Image (cartoon, grey):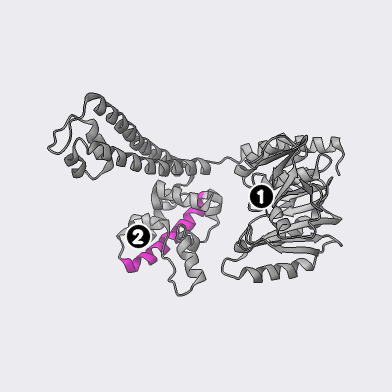
Amino acid sequence: MLPKSKAASLRDRNIALTKKDIRESVTPDQMIIQALYSYDELTKIAHNLAGRIRGWFSLTNPELEHRISDNRAFVEQVLEKETKSAMGARFSDPDMKQLKELAKSCLSIFQEQEKLIIYIDTLMKRHMPNVFVLVGGKLGARLLSMAGSSKKLARMPASTIQLLGAEKALFRHLINKKVKPPKHGVLHEHPLVQKADRNRRGKIARTLADKLAIAAKVDYFGGKFMGDKLLKMIR
Amino acid sequence: MKQKKFDGIFENGNRLYTKNLVRGSVYGERLFKEGKHEYREWDPKRSKLSAAIMKGASQIGLREHHVVLYLGASTGTTPSHISDIVGNRGFVFALDFAPRMVRKLVFLCEQRKNMAPLLANASEPDTYQDRITMVDYVYQDIAQRDQLRIFLLNCSRFLEKGGFAALCVKARSVDVARRPKDIFLETRKELEKHLTIIDYRELDPFEKDHCIFICKKTRDLHL
């Protein structure tokens, strides 16, 4: 049991201190991670919305819808001039106007994504320059988000970085040793890994992860820029 | 509404309840009114302490007026029920180290006069020792590999002699590849060296691969 006055003062003091702690716990890491998640969210939304616009637009011009497979190019085309079609029904002006409103929203999502990428790149260049040089802004941010923070990423062994994003496959392997271990997680997005032959991907992912582990440490502990050297070593 | 044999815990049909200290629902749980009192449903699927009681724990050691140190408070689901149980003359220090969780905890503590939030790492007692007092009860539910070490550390530092403590063990966060039973057994052996175990429950089917130990501090800990 605590005396009433002691309890009240402990509570007031801890609420005040904790509010301050929470306020001060916000880091650039979180800005990058939130931006990346927003980007991912917009990817999903744009995909769904473009699909809906395709469904609607193909009532008036199925040929055009069929011809353009890229979502962004398609949406831009919808916003362009009127088009003719043999199979499509003629839309009244209000019909077309409503559809174009939707296409405008979709286009603005694509544009928002571009802005987010620029924003992420800027932040990554400033806070994690070495990682940025090795894997670029988006992939670097993705590794950061999977590690949780730049502190955690800096403390990760290269082997863990190599497999970030391959947790499911890794645990499948750990529980049943007959299953082969995964070669890479999100690092498969990296052009060097993608270009490589299948049987060399693991080796390249490992080398890349090694250098990333160094880069993350240099970035976190504020060392000199050495990303270019690391990049040369990989090549 | 029937009083269970534990302080502040009630039963109606198959459901557990605690008497609500502050009007209203905390996290969307159902409310039950009887006379002028309001009771909050205590779902064993959302709270391991509730699950332990449902699984027939003979004792949980938690009494009215207790001062509690709650490690791994998260957004305050279980802490709010503990706050109900210890009542206005008890107190709960609710600690978590994720700012996102503690944010919600702060709002909860602003509603309840017997709770205080702490944003700290349970494995570093030095960082919060000047913010709390000695306690009658330690409750720990954190998914860390060295959860046992953290538990003993805190019991040794902050738990009064004769006080009780509850440890939730999540086998999956100790070692994913080993059998949960082995991990529970190993934990028990280590725990017994320092504390007296008075109850043990596996929480299946409410929580998979979890168990809870209710302990009493009968002597000083030598870590």
Residue A211: % across, % down: 44, 59
Q: Is residue A224 left or right of residue B114?
A: left
Residue B159: % across, % down: 82, 54
Residue A41: which quarter of the image? top left
Identify the residue shown where x is 37% and y is 58%. A188
- In the rendered image, the vertical position of residue B210 relative to residue A52, given as above or below: below
Range of magenta residues: A198-219
Instruction: Classify the position of the C terminus of chain B by image quarter.
Output: bottom right
Residue at the spot of label 1: B43
Residue A78: % across, % down: 23, 34
How far apart marks 2 and 1 lie (CA) works out to 48 Å
Residue sitting at the far top: A93
Camera-nearest residue between B64 and A184? B64
Amino acid type shown at disc 2 = Val
Please report, as a chain letter, where disc 2 is located.
A
Is residue A100 found inside the magenta-colored segment of the image? no
